[in-house]
Image: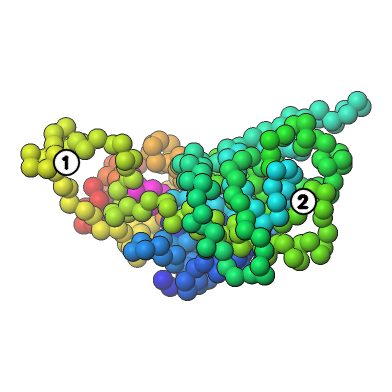
């Protein structure tokens, strides 16, 4: 897995974001051979391999810095660059109730406790909520119900055995230092079921919400408690909480299904074994007739297709690019940005590959530029790659 320079791309099954260096180190320790990737507009990612049995997943990691805005922007960039199967935010949080130092909380929802109206009579909350992806929450519940994740915790200093919870978090831009503070009281009244509070979870899920088909989950280790904060606590418990959250995260990553053919959609276990073409079963086995597998496109393949697409007259215009996405309603909504950049083109092509929509893309481009050599070349290359 080689690193790329400016404008290069790579593929990642999962992207893991963190805010702090101590969190980043804990996540990075689970990867084999992490290598830097200089992404578009200066955002730095590293790519590494995570192996679970015979399966290997490519994981991209990135440090956003503290705060909801940076987390939201990083999700947007990760979606456009990697089109991952899942994106996780992993790090530390302050415990509000029902948790101990070192415990892990996987958020099924995150509340924004800061939105509201400040009036003469007091603060009137207008709290907003984002939910984590249903499938990832279900996986988190399975991981939390067992102990398989705990042996993944990297050696530390003999901290107590952690527990895992799947419950809501609250997020905002303030450091909450006491349960009787203004924010502490606000959390008690408006987010009473939140186990912990952080500074990035809401922005992270907001960024995922803006990118359809992007599954997201927040995972936090408890590094301090609402009534027991201080630098000494951070020094002792932030590394412990970070290691615990990373261990839980990679146990979950190891359970994310990996399709044998990465271009084919993942089907649920309940899907009927019927042939989509005929609705019949194989006479001998009751299984559907096998269809030929297509090879997964390489980065070079995608790069050539992206360059060809952007060579079509007018395609680098933001207005024409948006028109293209509008004509691909089942595909264009899954692409993160509308900037007509090469990274955007690569993101669109990845989605088209995964959803078997390359033929649809070729048809729309041919309508836009019926006699253009670049449009004809795009059709030829798609046919040559067996993607129609």
Query: What is the span of residues highlighted in magenta in the rendered image?
Result: 348-355
- Is 42 in front, or is 315? 42
Q: Which residue is mark 1?
A: 288
Percent from the top left, x then y, of residue 356? 29, 45
Residue at point 25% right, 51% down? 387
Percent from the top left, x then y, of residue 192? 72, 34
Residue at point 75% right, 31% down? 190
Q: CA distance from mark 1 to mark 2?
A: 55 Å
Q: Which residue is mark 2?
A: 225
Disc 1 element? loop
Which corner quadrant of the image does residue 377 belong to?
A: bottom left
State left or right for residue 224 relative to residue 18.
right
Name the mark nearer the viewer: 1 or 2: 2
For the stretch drawn in magenta, what is the main secondary structure? helix
Percent from the top left, x then y, of residue 116? 77, 32
Percent from the top left, x then y, of residue 297? 31, 59
Residue 39: say if magenta.
no
Residue 354: say if magenta.
yes
Disc 2 element? strand
- Is 3 in front, or is 339? 3
């Amino acid at each position: 897995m080689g690193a790329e320079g400016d404008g290069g791309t790579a593929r990642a099954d999962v992207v893991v974001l963190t805010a702090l260096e101590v969190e980043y180190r804990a996540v990075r320790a689970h990867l084999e051979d992490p290598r830097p990737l200089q992404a578009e507009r200066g955002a730095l990612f590293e790519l590494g391999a995570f192996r679970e049995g015979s399966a290997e997943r490519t994981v991209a990691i990135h440090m956003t810095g503290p705060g909801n805005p940076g987390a939201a922007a990083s999700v947007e960039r990760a979606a456009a660059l990697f089109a991952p199967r899942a994106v996780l935010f992993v790090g530390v949080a302050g415990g509000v109730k029902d948790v101990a130092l070192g415990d892990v909380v996987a958020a099924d929802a995150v509340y924004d406790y800061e939105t509201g109206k400040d009036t003469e009579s007091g603060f009137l909350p207008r709290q907003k909520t984002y939910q984590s992806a249903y499938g990832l929450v279900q996986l988190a519940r399975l991981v939390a119900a067992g102990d398989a994740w705990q042996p993944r915790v990297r050696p530390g200093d003999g901290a107590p055995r952690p527990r895992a919870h799947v419950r809501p978090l609250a997020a905002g831009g303030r450091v909450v230092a006491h349960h009787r503070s203004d924010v502490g009281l606000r959390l008690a009244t408006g987010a009473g079921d939140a186990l912990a509070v952080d500074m990035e979870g809401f922005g992270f899920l907001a960024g995922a919400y803006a990118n359809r088909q992007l599954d997201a989950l927040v995972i936090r280790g408890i590094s301090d408690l609402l009534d027991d904060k201080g630098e000494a606590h951070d020094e002792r418990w932030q590394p412990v909480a970070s290691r615990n959250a990373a261990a839980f995260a990679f146990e979950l990553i190891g359970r994310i299904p990996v399709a044998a053919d990465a271009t084919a959609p993942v089907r649920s276990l309940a899907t009927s074994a019927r042939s989509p073409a005929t609705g019949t079963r194989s006479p001998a086995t009751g299984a559907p007739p096998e269809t030929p597998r297509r090879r997964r496109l390489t980065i070079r393949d995608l790069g050539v297709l992206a360059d060809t697409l952007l060579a079509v007259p007018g395609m680098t215009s933001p207005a024409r690019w948006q028109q293209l996405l509008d004509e691909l309603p089942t595909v264009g909504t899954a692409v993160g940005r509308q900037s007509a950049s090469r990274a955007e083109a690569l993101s669109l092509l990845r989605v088209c590959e995964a959803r078997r929509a390359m033929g649809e893309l070729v048809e729309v481009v041919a309508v836009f530029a019926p006699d253009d050599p670049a449009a004809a070349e795009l059709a030829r290359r798609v046919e040559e790659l067996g993607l129609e």
